[in-house]
Image (cartoon, rainbow, N blue to C red):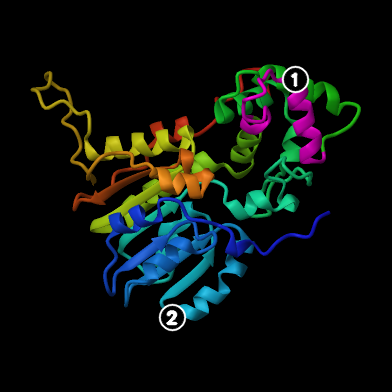
Amino acid sequence: MTPSRPPFDRHVPVLLAEAIAALGPRAEGRYLDATFGAGGYSRALLATPGAQVLALDRDPAGVRGGARLVEEARGRLRLVEARFSELEKIAARENFLPLQGVVFDVGVSSMQLDEPDRGFSFRDDGPLDMRMGGVGPTAAEIVNTASVERLADIFHYFGEERAARRIARAIVHDRESQPFTTTGQLARLIARIAPHRQSDIHPATKSFQALRIAVNDELAELVDGLCAAERALAPEGRLAVVTFHSLEDRLVKLFLAARSGRGETQSRRLPGEPAPQPPTFRLEGPQPRSPLADEIAANPRARSAKLRVAARTAEPAREFDEALARRARLPAPASGRS
């Protein structure tokens, strides 16, 4: 297999300037980078003299790669291996509450996509893994054991793949004679089964996205992380979330709409109808914000990015949003399904 290139010089943070401007870092403020990656957002926050940064990354490679920046920060950066759903717990443990800002850069990183051994991409053949943290079931285990119904749900709900059931049936048929072990093997099957035009993206793109989300429980993690940020932010603390596909952006949009009261009627209510809860976030400026043409030209991966920002009010954090969490999960298997 081709030797891996050093990853931490080739990741380009998207909407970096806009996200940092929205956070408005100030001296002695406490800021949490929930998705350290190659450290782009943390480094930008540290550019404000005196700002303190706590960064999380569920990928051990990200934590190892950030050791140099931790050293350069001279005590102003702490880097912890953790999921961003744990941000409140980690910040409390580090005596780092309340926070003046939280930034999320959601999804897979360029470094992970560019490393064939991680199994996130079909551009180069590699093991069918896709785990961000190196623990739990791999994509291969899901592909080789899940039922037709479950695989179809994964591809449909997490990949918005129109040929979800056809792909699922083909996988279950083919794995009987040869289990799936590599990204190339799965991508070739999908290319054979799923309809596509020459000008389209690769036919396996949506299915690979869906498997990655399922392996890492990414959408549920996002809902947990947003609720944790609400609890951890100080009044007037800023939240900035960068997403790269519609499933993530929809969850962030719904969360902030509910928490800010956007869409709530101001008219008189029916007898017995409960009053709306006071807003815990305040939306500022147009939502979402998208990259400018020059950023997209310099970094094509930026083309689908969206940034949503909000400021925390002084109202107490609400209870966990179970309705939103249901949107982040697959439907429960019907009787007789698995």
Residue that numbered label 2 is attached to: 75
Check the image and report above or below for 7 versus 112.
Answer: below
Which residue in the structure is indicated by mark 1? Answer: 193
Where does residue 332 sit, x and y in percent of width and height? Answer: 57, 25
- Checking the image for residue 247, the label placed there is none
Q: Which residues are magenta?
A: 181-206
The image shows residue 215 at horizontal and vertical percentages of 64, 41
Q: Residues within 10 Å of mark 1 (few under 14, many from 20)?
A: some
Residue 305 position, x and y percent, is 44, 42
Classify residue 217 as left or right of residue 41. right
Lower sequence index among marks 1 and 2: 2
Type of amino acid under label 1: Ile
Q: CA distance from mark 1 to mark 2?
A: 53 Å
Q: Nearer the viewer, mark 1 or mark 2?
A: 1
Q: Quadrant of the C terminus?
A: top right
Q: Which sits in the foreground, 28 or 145?
A: 28
Who's the residue at 9% across and 23% down the image? 267
Q: Quadrant of the N terminus?
A: bottom right
* Residue type at tag 2: Gly
**Residue 80 falls left or right of residue 115:** left
